Amino acid sequence: MGKVYLIGAGPGDEELITLKAARKLGECTAVMYDRLSGSGVLKYLNDNCKIYYCGKEPGCHYKSQDEINAMLIKLAKEGHIVGRIKGGDPYIFGRGGEEALALLKEHIEFEVIPGITSPISVLNYAGIPVTHRKIAQSFHVFTGKTADKLNIDWNAAAKIGGTLIFLMGFKNLDVICSNLIKNGMNKNTPCAVVMRGTTSRQKKIVGQLHDISEKTNRALLVSPCIIVIGEVVNFNEQLDWYEKKPLFGKNICITRSKAQSREMCQKLLDLGAEVTEIHSIEIRYTSENIKAYMNKLHDYDYIVFTSVNGVNSFFDRLLNENYDIRKIRGKFAAIGPATEKAIRQRGIIPEMVAEKFVAESLHDKMKDFIKKGDKIFIPRSKNSRPYLAETLRLEGCIVDECYTYETISGKLPDKDCFDNVDTVVFTSPTTVNNMIQLVGITAIKEKNVVAIGPITGKELESHNIVYDMSHEYTTEGVINTILNGSEL
């Protein structure tokens, strides 16, 4: 018998997830998630975890609640550690209680991991505090999904004071507003509707109780939305911080491997973007190949690294083999600042660093140092260009190449994850070709495209894909290119 975690994943921003939820997701062998949690939380899963989508689009339920309950029970009885990922909090209009009771009936162990609930977090991102001293000393949350049928005491709701919040009630906005007005609430009471809060598709419409429905219809809002009614709505411009971020409203796709995506992802999130990670390449390490060269590492005049992965695979293998790096007498060379940083983190200062992340730049840097007969060791990817090794051999150097890793095609975290992307970032020719296989060239041509440098740009050109190129072949350079494009 397995175990089930009912996990609240927050309102949509992938970082609004608790530490415990992220840790437990890493332990899961199977997960079931819905659309409101977003696909960003899937980054916390291990590579072998089975993923099941059980979202309920309005008017198109992929799974009924009974089917979801049955699936949870089935997976647990198969011995899986199951993560039931739910948007917001499992027990706040999330039907988590029903799922827990179904598990209890089958004597299946479960835990509930609370999540950041949308009535508070979405309104925070919209600049609306749910309470404020002397203005709103309480808040009240209702489900508006079937507001025309639910036994809501509209007279009490209209007179209770504080802030009223309705979830899942957008299609019943007219019903909600008219019932409140009929029961004595001032028709000029401030009101706001926030669509897709905390994501790149967040949209906020502000009005009053009597006209908010007309305004949202003109703005073409669609579910999911949160309705908030009360004087705190008047703070929405003054306390608006999220929508003022420079990349607010942008959904940017990073196509790098999981390990390499972290820095760029975090910087984009801080600038207000939503990030879709599609790891179009995965790294398969073959660093055991270094063992064939270990007895002569001390003979090389230069050790040349062309990527961060090359650095990590090299040093990790030496550590695993108890090799003392003090035996290495050669000088170290690095392609680009990221590779240099990775070498420095190993306690070694590279003698030569190419300013640009291309092999030609590193060769230009090395040619003033090397001489005929120098022995050079290049631990690199099996998939990388042979340019550097071939050029050094033409100059009379003795070059040994060792394939310490290779890149293989990744997979889509979610079949629809690319739909809402505005901009795609490519960092190598391999990411270009793999993404074409994963999402199709037509879908890519519909997006804004950024290439990290000319080698990647050349590959895009071969497919007739229009792109902007970063003038600095680094994460910062890519982000500056995106920022400059967003200002146009």
Image: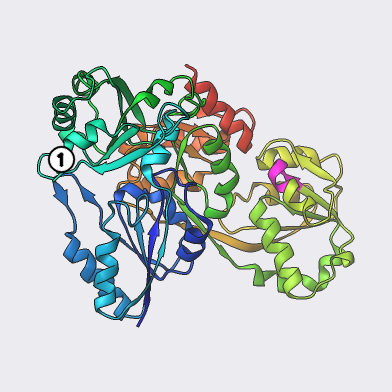
- Residue 436 lies in magenta, yes or no? no
Residue at 56% from the left image edge and 60% from the top image edge: 406
Residue 27's place in the image compared with 275, above or below, is below
Which of these two is toward me, 204 or 98? 98
Tell me which amino acid carries mark 1. Ala
Q: Quadrant of residue 209?
A: top left
Relative image position of residue 57 (x, y in whole percent): 21, 47
Q: Residue at x 39, y 47 (%)?
A: 117
Give coordinates of residue 363: x percent, y percent.
74, 42
Residue 49 against residue 381 in the figure, above or below:
below
In the image, is 54 to the left or to the right of 274?
A: left
Residue 252 visible? The answer is yes
Residue at 51 percent across and 44 percent down: it is 429
Residue 181, position as x, y percentages in the image:
17, 24
**What element does badge 1 sit on?**
loop
Tally of numbered tags: 1
Q: Which residues are magenta?
A: 334-339
Looking at the picture, tell me which residue is in the foreground, 43 or 181. 181
Q: According to the image, label 1 marks what residue?
A: 147
Relative side of 223 to 346, left or right: left
User: Which image quarter is the N terminus in?
Assistant: bottom left
- The answer to whether residue 46 of the structure is visible from this angle is no
Q: Is residue 435 left or right of residue 362?
A: left
Q: Position of residue 17 (x, y in %)?
A: 47, 51
Depth check: 398 or 206 in front?
Answer: 206
